[in-house]
Amino acid sequence: MYNKPVKLETLIHILKEKGKLRKIGGEAYLSRIIKNGEVEQDVEYYAKIVRDKACLRRIIEKDEDNVDDILDFVEDSVFEILETKIKPKYYYHIGKLIEKSIDILEECERDKSKVKEMPAGVNLLENVMPGIEKPGFYAFYVHPRIGKTNYILSIVEDAAVVKNIPVAILSLDTPKEQLSMWLLLYKAGVELSRQKQVFLKKDDWIELVSAAGDLCSAPIYIDDSPDIMLREIIQKAHSFKKDIDTGIIIIDHFELINAHSSSEDTNHDFVKSMKSLKVLAKDLDMAIVTFLNKFSTLDILKYHVDTVALISGDKKIFHTNRSRENT
């Protein structure tokens, strides 16, 4: 019954079952309350119905136009509806998260038992392959023992901090607080132990303060919404482009986008998603970078992205479909 108009018969039945109908004044009293309040109470619900029906009527009225116009109109209508259903504030600027990261590190200094695990090792992406350019669609698989996170952090630092290009991170698995902590430590160049734990020295705090300042002024935005579908990714990309003129979108744990798909053909789902995002990158004039968790998906996807990369120890394999003018 939530967010729907109250039906008198249903409400009377429920109250009778609970033995509370007589206590509130009976059917006559309840009828008066609902009759007097139904206009204000239900206006939002019925307004939504009117809006949705109007949208459908506009689509029907387009039946005499050419197919391309109809498709463009439907696409715009879908994004308009999605924007009303998605949470108004689903992403966070890194500046709002860094302060909490500093607080956590200070707490760890006071109590070593609360030391958090962090990604170990530093591998700069620019030392491995050419820079990321827009428009373009990229897919990376980094072997777990190397540290995928560092490649993500390297892209973010180079683009947002060094080049001031707005970067949006869609983290489908890692919480935004943890990701902001990793960014802070990475930017500060804090040395990590073999146990993947942070032991800060006095000099580290100077670097951390400097890194925090750089990150807070950088155009970095994090969205850690879980369980999102491809259509939501597309909608978010349009919003990022409109709101902050995003140049690069990074999608971690890309396979999770299709985790709730009803299709049994996983490979087909991946290819479909990749094709859609490749078109999206071109339409929005941005770079979309995806990181994969499964090595087996690389061979399937290499013909559907601009650049695919396998990074495993000393083994670095790249397959690109970009023209020489764009490489």
Image: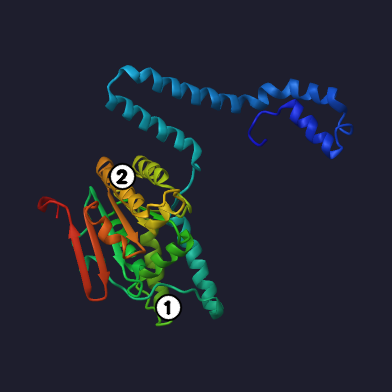
Q: Secondary structure at mark 1?
A: loop
Q: Going by the image, does 206 lie left or right of 101? A: left
Q: Residues within 10 Å of mark 2 (few under 14, many from 20)?
A: some
Q: Earlier in the sequence, mark 1 or mark 2?
A: 1
Q: Nearer the viewer, residue 162 or 85?
A: 85
Mark number displayed over residue 196? 1
Q: Nearer the viewer, residue 242 or 277?
A: 277
Residue 229 coordinates in the image, percent (x, y): 43, 47
Looking at the image, the residue that sits furthest to the bottom is 194
Relative to 180, is 18 above or below? Answer: above
Q: Residue 117: image x %, image y %?
A: 46, 74
Q: In the picture, residue 126 is in which quadrant?
A: bottom left
Question: Mark number for residue 70?
Answer: none
Name the residue carrying label 2.
276
Cα–Cα span, label 1 and label 2: 37 Å
In the image, is residue 95 above or below residue 57?
Answer: below
Q: Residue at x 74, y 30 (%)?
A: 10
Q: Is residue 213 above or below residue 145?
A: above
